[in-house]
Image (cartoon, rainbow, N blue to C red):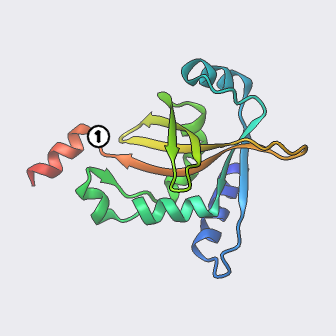
Amino acid sequence: MSEIHQQIEALYDFALDNPTNEYRVVDIMPIEISLSEHIFLETGVDLRGFWFSIDNYSIVHTLLRHGNPAKESKHGQIAVVKADFIRLPEILTSPDSIRLDFRTYANSIIKESLIFYKSYEHHYVVAKEIRRELKKGKVNRLILQTMFIRKNAETRSASLEK
């Protein structure tokens, strides 16, 4: 297992056993120039100098929203598990497609996100919030918001027939 995967696995374990609600972030890897150029062409977002990152709060959020097998099955989805978080570097560096998304929150703050799509045996959807830091020495991050997994069409049809 690579060092990146080990860091994600350790953060996942920490997220599930964090009684003091301490915040931790792992900078997975810098976004390579060729990928940032590809993202810019698809979305118009310039990510030169950004890092792919994940924090323990996004892991907890994802598991609470998309980690229950019974609930996800009702929506034609599959529950997210530890192995899916470990797969993130591969999903993010070789997505099938990417789109820009804007969310307005109750406090009228608008947040930009990029949605990464990747198909394997099922379809992964990964939302990453764009966090630009204006202070010198701070890291610009594309940080995990949430992730969910849609069943492929064949699996979905078979489960509906039961």
Which is nearer the eye, 133 or 31? 133
- Look at label 1 and name its amino acid: Asn
Which is nearer the eye, 103 or 98? 103
Left or right placement of residue 72 versus residue 63 in this view = left
Instruction: Please provide percent x and percent y for residue 38.
Output: 61, 21
| Quarter of the picture holding the C terminus | bottom left
Q: Residue at x 57, y 52 (%)?
A: 86
- Confirm whether residue 17 shows in the render: yes
Left or right placement of residue 89 versus residue 33 in this view = left
Instruction: Please provide percent x and percent y for residue 27.
Output: 73, 49
Left or right placement of residue 161 versus residue 94 in this view = left
Q: Is residue 94 above or below residue 14?
A: above
Which is nearer the eye, 12 or 141? 141
Q: Residue at x 56, y 24 (%)?
A: 43
Tell me which corner region of the image, top left, top right, bottom left or bottom right, holds residue 64. Answer: bottom left
Q: Which residue is mark 1?
A: 152
Task: Answer few, some or many: residues within 10 Å of disc 1's Cα (few below 14, many 20 plus, some between 14 and 19).
Answer: some
Which is nearer the eye, 37 or 43? 43
Q: Tag 1, which secondary structure?
A: loop
Q: Residue at x 28, y 65 (%)?
A: 70
